[in-house]
Image (cartoon, helix red, strand yellow):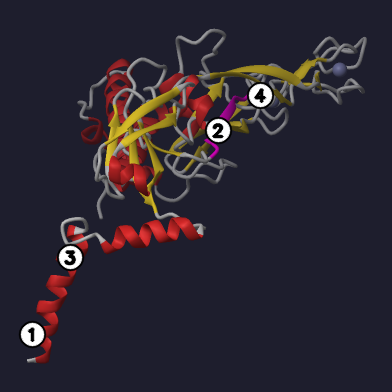
Amino acid sequence: MSKQDYYELLGVSKQADAAALKKAYRKLAMQHHPDRNPGDKSAESKFKELGEAYEVLKDGDKRAAYDRYGHAAFEGGMGGGGQSRGGGFDFSDIFEEFFGGGGGGRRRRGGGDAGRGGDLRFNLEISLEDAFAGKNDTITVPGHEACDACHGTGAEAGTQPEICGGCGGAGKVRATQGFFMVERTCPTCNGAGQVISSPCKPCRGAGKIQKDKTLNVNVPQGVEDGTRIRLAGEGEPGMAGAPDGDLYIFLSITPHSLFKRDGDMLFCQVPIPMVTAALGGEIEVPNLGGGRAKVKIPAGSQSGRQFRLRGKGMPELHGGYKGDMILEAIVETPVNLSKQQKELLREFADKTDAEVNPRTAGFFSKAKELWEDLTD
Ligand SMILES: [Zn+2]
Ligand SMILES: [Zn+2]
């Protein structure tokens, strides 16, 4: 299978500048994002291809190599330089593309990724009621603060970090690999750009010491199970001045004892006493948002009959419009009958005819036809 041309894939000309590339990529990536196309494998692979194409074209060196040699420039040879990413495609960049910008205190990650702190995952379980109403929660996660002893420099008191001789302070070194130049994290300073000859003892040269921190998590109304919330810069600390990682909160919603949710719809199976189902009446059901809803049960309701309560379902994300609640009646056959109740029911049964139980009567008249056919 031959690979599609990166420019074609992104729908841009070979002369497209960085802004045009970014714009085209953003638009297409949004369109094919797995969150928007759950379960769609072709959208997922398209999304990955787009990421790969953009990863190459946004980088001057890689783009030049691609223009010259096409896909062959990246076949084999890649990934030998201690890079852990598969085809040069870094999923975390996608998050940056989608959620980056606009947020307070968010940094651009421009180039200097070496030494960046790792991302952290925190699993937060909430109830369906919380997903309905939204919730402000606090969580405790491992955090860090500047080391007092070295004031965050990582160098022992009285000494200073020195500029790394291996990279001249850039944190990266260039090397030829295959057809083109690659940039690698400087092995001498691990990308920090500086070296510490006598590290601070309390923090072992990191400049930071561990201290748990409490974070506020705003769970918006209407969140779905599996939603991720990203708290930029709340992950592991970066090495000596490199950016901190991000914290991803993975939300899961505890199954509810009464309600099942599907998007903005809520489903609830409600048992209805046989007599209520036969004579008609009214039942009450709880609302997720508090209070109760009254539902009229028409006489002669059968098991499986559904009742729609408009606007009593889940809110859309961040509130506003609400979906519907669907109640499904389950007619309950009475059990543990007293002697007197049994007699009443027998008396009732004696007086019933085909009109009282039309489905039963219909079933057996069809069955009889079948038996007659079979015995012929
Ligand atoms: Zn220190
Ligand atoms: Zn260095």
Does the Cβ of the disc 3 residue fall within 8 Å of ligand 1?
A: no
350 w.r.t. 154: above or below: below
Q: Which residues are magenta?
A: 245-254
- Lower sequence index among marks 4 and 2: 4
- Lower sequence index among marks 3 and 1: 3
- Lower sequence index among marks 3 and 4: 4
Q: Nearer the viewer, mark 2 or mark 1?
A: 1
- SS of the residue under disc 1: helix
Q: Quadrant of residue 127?
A: top right
Q: Quadrant of residue 344?
A: bottom left
For ligand 1, the image quadrant comes to top right
Mark number, residue 250 = 2
Name the amino acid type tagged 3.
Ala
User: Whole-percent x and y of residue 295?
Assistant: 33, 30
- Disc 2 from disc 1: Cα separation: 62 Å
Name the amino acid type tagged 1.
Asp
User: Whole-percent x and y of residue 103?
Assistant: 49, 10
The residue labelled by disc 1 is 373
- Disc 2 from disc 3: Cα separation: 54 Å
- Disc 3 from disc 4: Cα separation: 90 Å
- Lower sequence index among marks 2 and 3: 2
Q: Nearer the viewer, mark 1 or mark 4?
A: 1
Q: Residues within 10 Å of mark 3 (few under 14, many from 20)?
A: some
